[in-house]
Amino acid sequence: MDAGRALLQARRRAGLSQRDLARRAGVAQSTVARIERGAMDPRVSTLDALLRACDDELRAVRRTDRDVDRSLIRAQLALPPGERIRAVGNAARFGESVHRDRLGASAS
Protein backbone atom coordinates (compact mmCIF):
# COMPACT_ATOMS: atom_id res chain seq x y z
CA MET A 1 0.00 0.00 0.00
CA ASP A 2 1.33 3.42 -0.84
CA ALA A 3 1.69 6.26 1.65
CA GLY A 4 -1.18 8.29 0.22
CA ARG A 5 -3.70 5.49 0.43
CA ALA A 6 -2.54 4.53 3.93
CA LEU A 7 -2.90 8.12 5.10
CA LEU A 8 -6.32 8.56 3.49
CA GLN A 9 -7.63 5.39 5.14
CA ALA A 10 -6.19 6.35 8.54
CA ARG A 11 -7.67 9.84 8.29
CA ARG A 12 -11.10 8.49 7.38
CA ARG A 13 -11.00 5.93 10.22
CA ALA A 14 -10.19 8.79 12.60
CA GLY A 15 -13.09 10.83 11.21
CA LEU A 16 -10.86 13.80 10.43
CA SER A 17 -10.95 16.29 7.60
CA GLN A 18 -7.71 17.11 5.83
CA ARG A 19 -7.71 20.48 7.59
CA ASP A 20 -8.18 18.88 11.03
CA LEU A 21 -5.42 16.37 10.37
CA ALA A 22 -3.06 19.05 9.11
CA ARG A 23 -3.68 21.17 12.20
CA ARG A 24 -3.05 18.22 14.54
CA ALA A 25 0.15 17.21 12.75
CA GLY A 26 1.48 20.72 12.25
CA VAL A 27 1.57 20.62 8.45
CA ALA A 28 -0.29 22.49 5.72
CA GLN A 29 -3.61 21.10 4.51
CA SER A 30 -2.20 21.17 0.97
CA THR A 31 0.55 18.79 2.12
CA VAL A 32 -2.04 16.29 3.33
CA ALA A 33 -3.93 16.62 0.04
CA ARG A 34 -0.79 16.13 -2.08
CA ILE A 35 0.25 13.05 -0.11
CA GLU A 36 -3.21 11.50 -0.29
CA ARG A 37 -3.49 11.93 -4.04
CA GLY A 38 0.04 10.56 -4.60
CA ALA A 39 1.52 13.83 -5.84
CA MET A 40 4.07 13.85 -3.01
CA ASP A 41 6.13 11.16 -1.31
CA PRO A 42 6.39 12.25 2.32
CA ARG A 43 9.43 11.84 4.51
CA VAL A 44 9.06 9.02 7.03
CA SER A 45 8.93 11.55 9.87
CA THR A 46 6.09 13.45 8.16
CA LEU A 47 4.06 10.32 7.49
CA ASP A 48 4.66 9.16 11.06
CA ALA A 49 3.42 12.50 12.46
CA LEU A 50 0.33 12.40 10.25
CA LEU A 51 -0.53 8.83 11.18
CA ARG A 52 -0.01 9.54 14.88
CA ALA A 53 -2.39 12.48 14.57
CA CYS A 54 -4.94 9.91 13.33
CA ASP A 55 -4.23 7.71 16.38
CA ASP A 56 -2.51 5.28 14.03
CA GLU A 57 1.12 4.33 13.65
CA LEU A 58 3.77 3.67 11.08
CA ARG A 59 5.37 0.25 11.47
CA ALA A 60 8.03 -1.52 9.47
CA VAL A 61 7.19 -5.19 9.18
CA ARG A 62 9.62 -7.67 7.76
CA ARG A 63 8.10 -9.56 4.87
CA THR A 64 8.45 -13.25 5.46
CA ASP A 65 7.11 -14.39 2.11
CA ARG A 66 10.44 -13.52 0.49
CA ASP A 67 12.67 -15.02 3.14
CA VAL A 68 14.65 -18.15 2.47
CA ASP A 69 15.17 -20.73 5.18
CA ARG A 70 18.93 -21.03 4.89
CA SER A 71 19.03 -23.95 7.31
CA LEU A 72 17.25 -26.07 4.69
CA ILE A 73 19.81 -25.07 2.09
CA ARG A 74 22.67 -25.92 4.44
CA ALA A 75 21.08 -29.29 5.24
CA GLN A 76 20.79 -30.14 1.54
CA LEU A 77 24.36 -29.08 0.85
CA ALA A 78 25.57 -31.32 3.69
CA LEU A 79 24.13 -34.39 1.93
CA PRO A 80 26.31 -36.46 -0.41
CA PRO A 81 25.65 -35.62 -4.08
CA GLY A 82 23.72 -38.85 -4.75
CA GLU A 83 21.32 -38.18 -1.88
CA ARG A 84 20.84 -34.60 -3.05
CA ILE A 85 19.89 -35.83 -6.51
CA ARG A 86 17.41 -38.33 -5.02
CA ALA A 87 15.91 -35.60 -2.82
CA VAL A 88 15.43 -33.30 -5.82
CA GLY A 89 13.80 -36.14 -7.76
CA ASN A 90 11.45 -36.87 -4.85
CA ALA A 91 10.50 -33.21 -4.59
CA ALA A 92 9.85 -33.04 -8.34
CA ARG A 93 7.65 -36.14 -8.24
CA PHE A 94 5.74 -34.73 -5.29
CA GLY A 95 5.18 -31.44 -7.13
CA GLU A 96 3.97 -33.31 -10.21
CA SER A 97 1.52 -35.36 -8.13
CA VAL A 98 0.13 -32.22 -6.48
CA HIS A 99 -0.24 -30.63 -9.91
CA ARG A 100 -2.04 -33.72 -11.27
CA ASP A 101 -4.35 -33.77 -8.23
CA ARG A 102 -5.24 -30.12 -8.77
CA LEU A 103 -5.91 -30.67 -12.45
CA GLY A 104 -8.08 -33.66 -11.61
CA ALA A 105 -10.02 -31.69 -9.02
CA SER A 106 -10.62 -28.80 -11.42
CA ALA A 107 -11.76 -31.14 -14.20
CA SER A 108 -14.57 -32.56 -12.05
Image: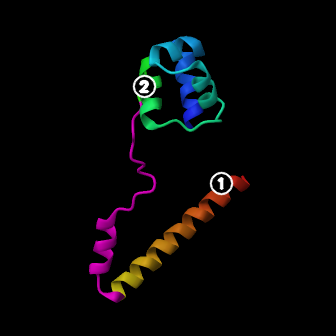
The residue under the point 34% across, 88% down is 81
Q: Position of residue 56 (x, y in %)?
A: 43, 22
Q: State the mark number for residue 105.
A: 1
* Mark toward the start of the polypeptide (1 vs 2): 2
Relative to the observer, which residue lies in front, 72 or 55? Answer: 55
User: Is residue 16 in view from this perspective?
Assistant: no
What amino acid is labelled 1 in the image?
A: Ala
Label 1, label 2: how far apart the Cα atoms are: 51 Å
Residue 83 within the magenta-colored segment of the rendering: no
Q: Is residue 71 left or right of residue 93?
A: left
Per the rendered image, the range of residues in magenta is 58-81
Pick the quarter of the image with the N terminus. Answer: top right
Q: State the mark number for residue 67.
A: none
The residue under the point 59% across, 16% down is 18
Where on the picture, by quarter, is residue 104?
A: bottom right
The residue under the point 58% across, 13% down is 19
* Above or below, comparing residue 94 to residue 44 in the picture: below
Residue hosting label 2: 49
Q: Is residue 61 left or right of residue 20?
A: left
What amino acid is labelled 2 in the image?
A: Ala
Q: Characterize the local packing of mark 2: few (<14), some (14-19) or many (20 or more) Cα atoms within 10 angstroms.
A: many
Q: Position of residue 63 (x, y in %)?
A: 42, 48
Relative to the observer, which residue lies in front, 107 or 8? Answer: 8
Relative to the observer, which residue lies in front, 29 or 51? Answer: 29
* Above or below, comparing residue 91 to residue 65 in the picture: below
SS of the residue under disc 1: helix
Where on the picture, by quarter, is residue 32?
A: top right
* Above or below, comparing residue 104 to residue 37 in the picture: below
